[in-house]
Amino acid sequence: MANLLGGIATSHIPAIGVAMDKGLEETPYWKDFFDAYPPVRDWLYTQEPDIAIIFYNDHGLEFFHDRKPTFAIGASELYENADEGWGIAEIPPVTGETELSWHIVNHLIEHDFDITVCQEMKVDHGLTVPLTLMWPGHKYGHIKVIPVAINCERHPMPKPSRCYAFGKAIGDAVRSFSGDQKVVVMGTGGLSHQLDGQRAGYINKPFDLYCMDKIVNEPELLTQFTNYELVEKAGAQGVELNMWLAMRGALENEGSLKELHRSYHLPISNTGAGLQLLATNNAR
Amino acid sequence: MASQGSIPGTIMLDGPMATKGYPLNKMCYSFNNASARDEFRTDEEAYYEKFKLTEEQKQAMRQRDVIGMLEAGGSIYYLAKFAGILGLNVQDVGGLQTGMTTDEFKAFLVKQGEV
């Protein structure tokens, strides 16, 4: 069986990608934020995962309202990216894989998650910024990525409890895969922020800290929220917590988890930016 | 969503709003392509016609009225691509929506960390 080593939750703010392009990591605005990442990178370096399953939301690069899936998964050897219209630099293509992807698809359908399968798709900053944060200098070519996109833009969106169950089903799929690959799961986005409306700029630090606290051992306190409540508490785009919950769901049947890292910075762009690492007992 | 009451300063992009906003969002989605951005810059009015924007949407676009675009069904993810054409970042757009200068808006963001 394939082994889940752990889960990483991280912000995917576009400005992070721009800052890395421009080499601003050591400037006063960015230094504390970027200083949080080396421990997580070191963990990845030590663990040598083969595959990263990345829960993210597409922000209108691959999916438009004409056909926007609620849950979608990639099954492709390669994923391109693009400048997204506002100018994030295009980076080398992301390596994919298909065998575990199709296994997950079969498992999901068998367990009543009728997912959209993409044999070709572009991935946006929701996936590429975290990848670049974990493997700077575009050194991510060795890691095989399985993109999993969750609708976080247009209501109705999948409920937090459903995103958690969805992640759990993917975790079960990994464990039932016949290969011996080492797998990490990532949940990207959040935490609280709101880009649109007169309420733009809203950030809720106490709620963000509460989420990071509870996601470790009491995720059920978070999955009981409705998306409406998440918008109320964490801003219109605070629903990106759903990706964190999917990541955490994937670890649900792994037994006890070790929290190896937690950090939070505010503001990064318009957002409360969190980073968290939860390791399973499969990790060295 | 609407049955749960409204959150001040927030427009939920639900089915009815997405229906209303479809032409505007479709136009902004096209800005993923550089050639589309050039075509827009060359003749904005013709580009509005091409995507059959409603009069409300055209007015909001002409006036660079972000709140107006949201009220006309715009989704911030696609509107951000239009903001990119104008060279605006999300702090600029935040300022435009809240009546603050960009610097005031940035200070407002920082202040929320002081709790």
Image: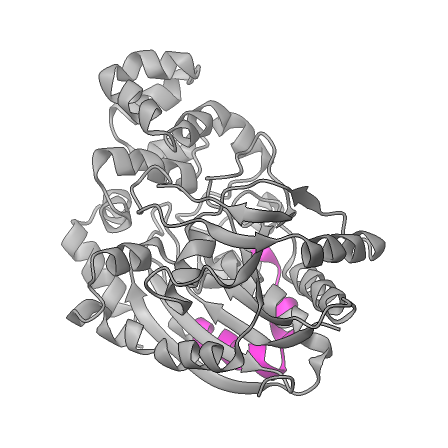
Residue in the image at 38% along x and 72% along y: A205
Please say if B60 is above or below A125. Answer: above
> In the image, is residue A125 above or below residue A116?
below
Location of the N terminus of chain A (image quadrant): bottom right
Extreme residue toward the right, this view: A110
Report if residue B60 is visible in the image: no
Which x, y percent locates residue A156? 62, 45
Tell me the magenta residue range.
Answer: A207-227
The location of residue B25, given as percent across then percent down, is: 45, 30
Q: Does A140 sit above or below residue B97?
A: below
Question: Relative to residue A41, is residue A169 drawn left or right?
Answer: right
Residue A134 image-quadrant placement: bottom left
- The spot of residue A145 in percent (x, y) is 55, 58
Question: Which residue is located at x 31 percent, y 60 percent?
Answer: A16
Reply yes or no: does residue A196 show up in magenta.
no
Question: In the image, residue B115 lies at what x, y percent?
Answer: 31, 77
Q: Which one is nearer the viewer's eye here, A2 or A85?
A: A2
- Report the predominant secondary structure element of the magenta stretch: helix
Quarter of the image that includes the C terminus of chain A: bottom right
Residue at figure coordinates x 69%, y 43% from the top left: A116
Q: Is residue A208 magenta?
A: yes
The type of colouring in the image is: one colour
Query: Taking A71 as reference, is A245 above or below it?
Result: below
Give the number of marks: 0
